[in-house]
Amino acid sequence: MNRRVTFILLALAFAVVIALTYSNHFRNSFHFDDSHVIQQNLNIRTIDIAKFFTDATTFSALPANQSYRPFLVTLFAIWYKLGSGQPFWFHVGAFACYMLLWMLLIVFFQRIFVLTSPNNDHGILSLMAASFYVLHAANAETVNYISAGSDLVSTTLMVMALVIYANWPRMRKYGIYLVPALLAMFTKETSAAFPLFLAAYILFENQVVGPSATKPRPPSISHSLRNAIPATLICLALLYLCQEIVPKTFLPSSHTRLEYVLAQPFVVLHYFITFFLPFNLSADTDWETIKNIFDDRFVVGVVFLSVLVVGAIKAWKKNSTRPIAFGILWFLIGVMPTSSGVVILSEVMNDHRMFLPFIGLSIALGWSVALFLQRMASKTAGLLAVLALMSCHAFGTFQRNKVWHNEETLWYDVTQKSPKNGRGLMNYGLSLMARGDIQSALFWFERALHLSPNYPYLHINVAIAHGALGDSVKAEDHFKKAIALSPQFHGCYYYYARFLDQLGRPDEALPLLSKALELGPGFIESRYLLMAVNAKIKDWKTLHIVVEETLKLAPNDDMAKSFQKMLKSINNLKVAEHRE
């Protein structure tokens, strides 16, 4: 009873610490992909679950980023409704999911530890290991970056599926555990790795020492794989569905597969080191691909992976160290979706890709610390050291939340840690331009152009800056350059059209806006500008069509309603004039 009370009190204490650690993140702003996934995305302004599950274009207003994540879109639509599109409720929803993950991890970790050593309940050890993971500074990106909610939600659902499978045999028998696994697949495609996590757990469960056993049971890899077949078939079927339903405009990366894959062993080493030394975290790194197998980074990465695999195999052979091996195996499975080359992504590495793999390393570290403390004469000193380490992580996470406060704080941090990232320099310039410092913004844009001369987004922003400074000739040159570099990107046409309208050339803006809507029908700003331009030139017929189309997509859109009201007033005036 005393042990249970101690556990409850410690759990409450850690819950308070976690809440305080993230207390400064709820008022943080939208960032990066949040613009096209949330702010400019008409689809999430109405909760239409049937549409979310049948139309992948609902995920983003940017065609190149329209992947199939209907459950995530549903959550975003609910959070949008709760907070009228403000980021606060998105952060509340994400944090609630994070706390749920924490509780699930406590249960899952305890299951792993109890299977290994059934004579102890390991509740406090599980609590501390799960709390260490939740307080880890690297996870601050996933919690703060709302679009990275795909990692947060999918990971929570996969862990939920494993908890159900591990703890409730009846639910295992009837396949109830597959429900959260299914939702995870509808949240992020990388959840297709779930059958591997499940097979690893089943193998672990079948090989540990039972309460009455004297020897470990013999390896049963075939049994593990056989029990994971239902999950495998479902995940493969859904992965195929995702590939079929995703629009052809989706462009995950421009890297070659070979160069991307060659970079990944060193990236995995970086992830591993970051778990123990989470310094130099960056929202947008300047890491590049590796061109050949003789690159030192590739060689070092391969040697590291070899040592890690050998270490895991040795640890697996002994029952007392098998949780360490299981944790390493989890880590390797966790990095596989983004590091194996099956999927080629735009960035070589991201901090939020560590979110899922670090669960495994938390298991391995927790059990390693427990074994170490057993050999210590004074366990108090060891526990104090662990608590000190967790306090450092909590402090680091609190500081990372400050970095994610707004666009300026985030992208300034990126310029310091990833100075060779043209996109990062551009985004910092954008934050300066947003507060009216055009000259400083142009300085950062020019630095970015030196690094990324063929980046269409950058040319658009350079054009906007020159336009704001009154140099229309340079502005038009960069707008045309952006269109030449990316003729399928709707933003090139929208911002050029906005510029022309501001110069008093609305007739030239109209065809550009038509093209922008053709390429990005979900981009709300194009519709707003097209309505404004048609009103300006008094093309009431076209304005009526655009207004009606917009209200079909977003029935409660205030801008469309205001133009609808204006059209009604004009029609009433015409009727009155006709009667006179």
Image: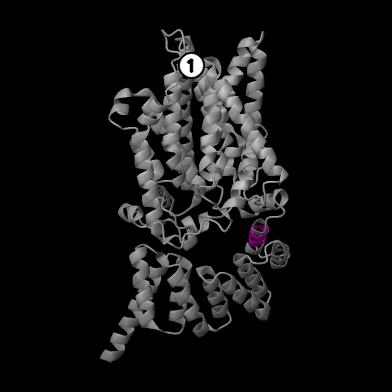
Report the front residue among 288 and 109.
288
Residue 120 in the image: above or below residue 430: above
Residue 157 percent across, percent down from the top left:
41, 37
Identify which residue is drawn at 48% across, 53% down: 86
Q: Quadrant of residue 25?
A: top right
Instruction: Tell me if 349 is positioned left or right of 469 in this view.
Output: left
On the image, the x and y values in percent for residue 46 come to: 36, 57
In this image, 413 relative to 6: left or right? Answer: right
Say if residue 26 shows up in the picture.
Answer: no
- 523 displayed left or right of 477: left
Q: What span is in magenta?
A: 425-431
Report the number of discs: 1
Camera-side residue of 356 and 382: 356
| Residue farthest toward the left in the current orientation of the protein | 579
**x, y (%) of residue 206?**
42, 20
Q: Amino acid at mark 1?
A: Thr
Q: Is 310 inside the magenta-drawn segment?
A: no
Circle 1 sits on which residue? Answer: 116
Identify the secondary structure beneath mark 1: helix
* Residue 369 rendering spot, x and y as whole percentages: 61, 19
Q: Is residue 211 above or below residue 41?
A: above
